[in-house]
Image (tube, helix red, strand yellow):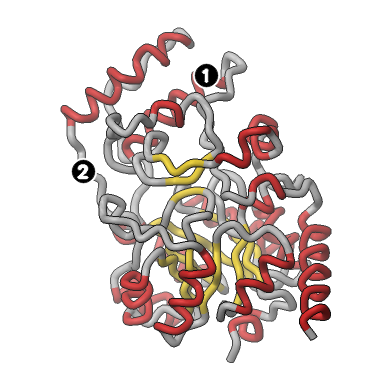
Amino acid sequence: MRFTDRLGLTLPLIQAPMAGVSTPALAAAVCEAGALGSIAIGATDVASARTMIADVRARTDRAFNVNVFVHRPAHADPVREAHWLDLLRPLFAEFRVEPPPALRTIYTSFADDADMLAMLVDTAPPVVSFHFGIPPADTLDALRARGVFMLATATSVDEAIAIEAAGIDAIGAQGIEAGGHRGMFEPQAPDAAMSTLALTETLAKTTHLPIIAAGGIMDGAGIAAALDRGAAGVQLGTAFIACPESAADEAYRAAVSGLSADTTILTSVISGRPARAIPNRFTALDTGSNIPPDYPRAYDAGKALHAAAKATGENGFGAHWAGQGAPFARSLPAAELIAALKAELEACREQQS
């Protein structure tokens, strides 16, 4: 059965989870419009995650996706972390605050979070997706027993093969164009940096699972191109940042529509993991020689610096994650955006016939 049929979708599109940006309102609006809406719970606690799931269910009876982070455990390195905080100290001083005395592991990996698993088994959302890796086999078995459809991100052939071997239902093929964090299992490993279309076609020919193309897709023509390369569907994230239902603040929205939106860069300085963002004062610290602590411990400092700066009206230290298609984002309600994407895809198909 095609994944669109199993999930009751009229458009083979997933709205990317985007922790801090996606909301139950956005996810539900996307679902009601015929695509798969998503929320991200990797950056929140179990109680809040349960509330978010309930909120989506109160707004729609259609299938939706819940995303978790499956990152490797962070290695605390006091010397490296002290050096990083010293590097950031002049910036904190600019906003008349002290940097954190020490860094914390602010996000628990789903691989080590029995309480989050218990909550997901209890609530059984229709779809659960994994970023940064694959959970243990017993975790997958528990979700599978509840009828949960599972999706995991791959940035390479090796990661996709591992996902298929684990018995997961679909693969998200994340190209180098994608905004936000690279889903690499090992962030320090060499990155093949394959484009979305090249990775999609390769994985469609290498594996037997549905491939969801993700990265740089902003319109119906992009959706058609991915489907023509063998994708069963697509995932769009940056396209939804400007929707009124998203939680992006005004500075983030301005960045997406600003002059730097077409020069996104991959950087690890904000969070400790490679992620594509719109350039700002924070990304300017990425000189190649400034090596941040492990994710998510580096992100503890990054969030503190952004909060201190934002309190004074300075927005140059925000994590303005965005893909290479950012200049083409549209400020439309989610339902209107889905309708536009569907019409554009249909127009492409008519031209091809």
Q: Taking 4 as reference, is 119 above or below it?
A: above
Q: Position of residue 279 (x, y in %)?
A: 53, 33
Residue name at image x 37 percent, y 80 percent:
164
Numbered mark located on residue 75 in the image: 2
Numbered mark located on residue 309 in the image: 1
Residue 237 seen? yes
Quadrant (top left, top right, bottom left, bottom right) of the N terminus: bottom right
Residue name at image x 62 percent, y 77 percent:
227
Name the residue nearer the viewer: 274 or 353.
Answer: 353
Name the residue nearer the viewer: 81 or 329.
Answer: 329
**Disc 2 residue type?**
His
Are there few (<14), some (14-19), or many (20+) residues within 10 Å of tag 1? Answer: many
SS of the residue under disc 1: helix
**Disc 1 residue type?**
Ala
Q: Position of residue 295 (x, y in %)?
A: 33, 43
Q: Taking 280 as reference, is 330 above or below it?
A: below
Residue located farthest toward the front when viewing the structure as drawn: 352
Quadrant (top left, top right, bottom left, bottom right) of the C terminus: bottom right
Res. 68 image quadrant: bottom left
In the rendered structure, the answer to whether residue 225 lies left or right of residue 285 reads right
As measured in the structure, the alpha-carbon distance from the residue carrying label 1 to the one carrying label 2 is 27 Å
Res. 221 image quadrant: bottom right
Name the residue nearer the viewer: 155 or 99.
Answer: 155
Q: Of marks 1 and 2, which one's residue comes earlier in the chain?
A: 2
Are there few (<14), some (14-19), or many (20+) residues within 10 Å of tag 2? Answer: few
Q: Taking 313 as reference, is 279 above or below it?
A: below
Q: Taking 259 as reference, is 88 above or below it?
A: above
